[in-house]
Amino acid sequence: MRPRDALLPAPGRGQYDRRLPRQQRLAEQRERLIAATALASAQDALPSVASIVELAGVGRNTFYEYFDDVKHALEATETAVLRRIEQALRDAEAMSRTPVERWRSLARAWLGFAETEPAPMLLTLRIEARSEGASSRGAALLDAAFMRSLETLRSAGVTAVAGAERVLAVASVGEAFARGLARARVSAQGRENNAFRAVDGAWERDRLERSLADVAVRLLR
């Protein structure tokens, strides 16, 4: 699967496939701007409209058809990315039967997203959470996923269940791992020997997955 970070070249003026429904063309155009905004924010804490449209391969007028300004684009991108992360975590939960399997699946889904969509992940890890607890909105989703696993244990009658502070500790480790992995992946993009770096990054992700799952088992079981 092609990561959302990897933007396809935008069709030239008048070259969009007119056989596609208009709504689909507009959705693809907005998705391109969302991906470009995430990439631009990974390269610059305060990206400009010019940098976003250059990455997206569209004009400034197209940007303003969807967003009022860069802040609006960043908020829309964050919302879209958080939705995808939450869905990935919930899918991981649904595929697991035991608590340990679930924690391993959550680690795999979380760090897999960080590797395949590093710029979007960094955006969610950079923005301060509105709620207490996790330090970023992305990590807040991971915290909530681990908390749901404990609620499942409580519902099953398990009395010795870890508290919220231990869940926060696991989520904080996951946040640090994801930030480091995503930064390394972003810095590797566009360099020479990228194929080798991709293999090396996959090995690193596997190691981090095992470490995060081990932290969860030790603190939550």
Image: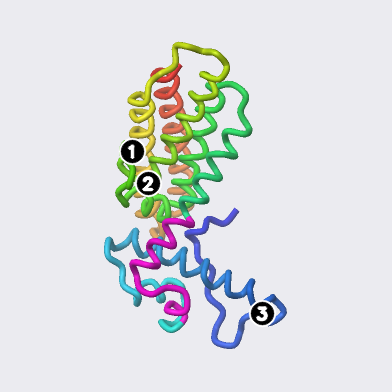
Q: How packed is label 2: few (under 14 Cα within 10 Å), some, or many (20 or more)?
A: many
Q: Is residue 219 left or right of residue 1?
A: left
What's the amino acid at mark 3?
A: Asp
Q: Are marks 1 and 2 in contact (CB under 8 Å)?
A: yes
In the image, residue 206 lies in the stretch drawn in magenta = no
What's the amino acid at mark 2?
A: Arg
- For numbered disc 1, what is the local secondary structure? loop
**Residue at (33% x, 43% y) in the render:** 131
**Residue identifier under label 1:** 134
- Specify which label sits upstream in the sequence, 2 or 3: 3
Give the number of the mark in front: 2 or 3: 2
Q: How packed is label 3: few (under 14 Cα within 10 Å), some, or many (20 or more)?
A: few
- For numbered disc 2, what is the local secondary structure? helix
Q: Are marks 1 and 3 in contact (CB under 8 Å)?
A: no
**Residue at (38% x, 21% y) in the render:** 163
- Specify which label sits upstream in the sequence, 1 or 3: 3
- Pick the quarter of the image with the C terminus: top left
What's the amino acid at mark 1?
A: Ala
